Every structure is written in structure tokens, then in C-alpha cells.
Amino acid sequence: KPLRRIAASFEELAAVAKQQPPMDAAAFSRACSNVSVLFGCLGIAFKFAERDYVAKVDDLLEASNSISTLPSMVELDIQKDTVRAVGSHTRNLLRVKRGIDMVKVLFEKMLVTEGNSLRDAASVAYAQVFAPHHGWAIRKAVAAGMYALPSKSQLLKKLNEDEESAKAQVQNFVRSSAPVIRYVEDLFTSRNLGIDW
């Protein structure tokens, strides 16, 4: 049951994020890798996001073998002046945070949207989180792909959940991902790196 694994791993991260010690890079990366399953279940509209997200999470997981915390990962890139360089751990961390943010917004919208369609929820989540950072061609491709999204019931079936069991896990993820997202954003803003690039 992937949703349970996702919710549980983010509840653990949220407890750490609220206490503000340096977050363990491996624990963060493992929790984020659990989310990859969701992008895979959303079909063609989020294929680019799945590939990009998985590659960035894999980089962070690999880096966590030698760099123990997220703050030290960012500090190393600051020292090497590679924060915004393509492939830097810091840049990848920002992209992964966006993936988590997108899933959070998608889940928030799923909780309040009637009916079986995911299109409105996914469109809002994409527009809010990814669209400002994508060029015209990608935005057009995603818009076209929205018509191929699975229905809510098809998504839940792929995740081995029913509406009731999924609702609790979705609410847990929405609640627990918020402090984790905030933690990563604070990591950037406290070092004047910004998060809009």
C-alpha cells in the first residue's frame, strides 16, 4: 500500500522538521522516493515530472552516502559556487521539493473536489507549482496530457486503496508534507538563495 508508506515516511520527516535539527539527507531522500509511485500512476501528463523527479531523488539518495544532512548538502554547493548549476544537489533538492508540493496540492484538491475526475485537481496543482517554471511547449504538452489522466477511482485502484482508506492517508500526507516543504524552503531563504528559479 504505497499511500501508507508515503504518509508514514512524511510523518517521520514532519516530526524532525518541526524540531528544526539538521534533517537527515538519507531519510529525506527515501521518503521522497516513496512518492515516485504516484507520478507513475498519473499517466502521460506527468511523465516528464516522474522522470525528472526520480532522477533528482536518485541524485540526493546517492549524495546522502557521503553528505549526512540537507543543510550540509546546501552548504557544500554554496562553498563550490554551484548552487544553481544544472545537476547540483541544491538545485535537485529544490526540484524535489516542488514535486512534493505538487502532490500536496493535488491531494488537497482531491479532498475537496466532487466526482471521479482528477483533471481539475491536477490542473490546479500543475498551474500552481510547475507551470511558472516551464516554457510554453511543456505547458502545452501537459495540458494535452491532462485528458489522459486516470480517474480518481482508477488511481486508487492502482494504489490498492478504496476511497475511505485513501482519504485518511491523503490527509496525513497533506498535513505532514507541509512542515517538510517549509523546512526545505527555509533552508533556501535563510541563505538568501531564493526558491523561484
Image: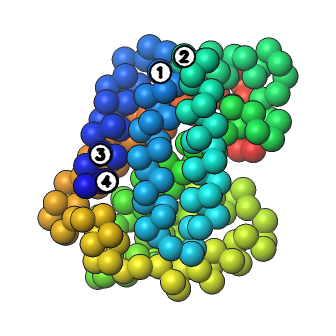
Give the side of residue 45 with respect to residue 118, left or right: right
Name the kind of residue labelled 1 in the image.
Asp
Of residues 76 and 63, the one drawn nearer to the viewer in this rendering: 63
Is tag 2's residue or tag 4's residue first in the polypeptide sequence?
Answer: 4
Q: Amino acid at mark 4?
A: Pro
Q: Nearer the viewer, residue 150 or 119?
A: 150
- Distance from the alpha carbon under mark 4 to that under mark 3: 5 Å
Q: Amino acid at mark 3?
A: Arg
The amino acid at mark 2 is Ser
Mark nearer the N terminus (3 vs 1): 3
* Residue 174 x %, y %: 34, 49
Residue 97, compared with residue 138, is above or below; it is above
Determine whether the residue tagged by mark 4 lies in a helix, strand or loop: helix
Instruction: Tell me if residue 194 can be seen.
Output: no
Which of pointers 4 and 1 indicates the residue nearer the eye? 4
Distance (Cα) linking label 1 and label 2: 6 Å
Query: Label for residue 68?
Result: 2
Q: Residues within 10 Å of mark 2 (few under 14, many from 20)?
A: some
The residue that mark 1 highlights is 24
Q: Earlier in the sequence, mark 3 or mark 2?
A: 3
The residue sitting at 75% across, 44% down in the picture is: 197
Q: Which residue is mark 4?
A: 2
Q: Which residue is mark 3?
A: 5
Q: Position of residue 196 (x, y in %)?
A: 71, 44
**Residues at marks 3 and 2, CA–CA distance in whole angstroms:** 23 Å
User: Quadrant of the rendered structure where residue 144 is?
Assistant: bottom right
Q: Residue at x 32, y 78 (%)?
A: 154
Going by the image, does 106 lie left or right of 193?
Answer: left
Q: Is residue 163 above or below residue 173?
A: below
Q: CA distance from mark 2 to mark 4?
A: 26 Å
The colour scheme is: rainbow
